[in-house]
Image (tube, rainbow, N blue to C red):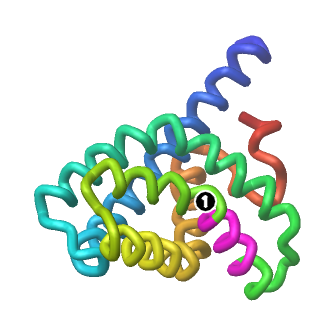
Amino acid sequence: MNEVASDRRRRGRAFVADTTALILFFTVTGALNERFVSGMSWDEVLHARLLGAALMIPVGRPYGMWRDRLMRYARPTRISRILWDSLALVTFQVPIYAAIIAISGASGRGFVLGILGATCIMLVSGRPYGAFLNWIRRLYGLPPGGDKPMSLQG
């Protein structure tokens, strides 16, 4: 197999891995936040999760690349990795999440609570999601992110 085809396959696996991880992890956490923190109805939650899944398809890989870029600043300590993973998740995902719940019917107090809830969830889940993402990447035969820039590897 030539190098171009190999690189194309690696990029395809990276897209699928990052997108799969994002959809699986945040469908669950998003639904819990929308229903129990922002008080959205189950119909609104379903609409938000369907819209969220559709938006995660083009966003999964760019987020993975964003996280990898920020994680290069993390020191090898647990605290540093937690902080950088959380910062990556909040800065990339909260603005997208705000748009999702606004389009799905959240407004006023529910909208603000939803964003605050999502921010808290993302601060807490930044590192667990980073570890989950790295695990999914390993399942696809890819190296974990943050140690070396995945964007250069596919």
Residue shown at the point (69%, 80%) measured from the top left: 82
Drawn side of residue 149 relative to residue 36, left or right: right
Q: Image height check: is 38 above or below 58? A: below
Q: Quadrant of the N terminus?
A: top right
Residue shown at the point (36%, 38%) measured from the top left: 54
Residue hosting label 1: 134
**Secondary structure beneath disc 1?**
helix
Drawn side of residue 29 relative to residue 21, left or right: left
Q: Image height check: is 8 above or below 69? A: above
Q: Position of residue 44 (x, y in %)?
A: 18, 57
Give the residue type at disc 1: Asn
Task: Pick the residue in front: 57 or 91.
Answer: 91
Q: Image height check: is 65 above or below 120? A: above
Task: Pick the residue in front: 3 or 74.
Answer: 74
Magenta-drawn segment: 82-90
Q: To which quarter of the image does residue 87 belong? A: bottom right
Secondary structure mainly formed by the magenta segment? helix
Residue shown at the point (58%, 51%) measured from the top left: 137
Q: Residue furthest front?
A: 108
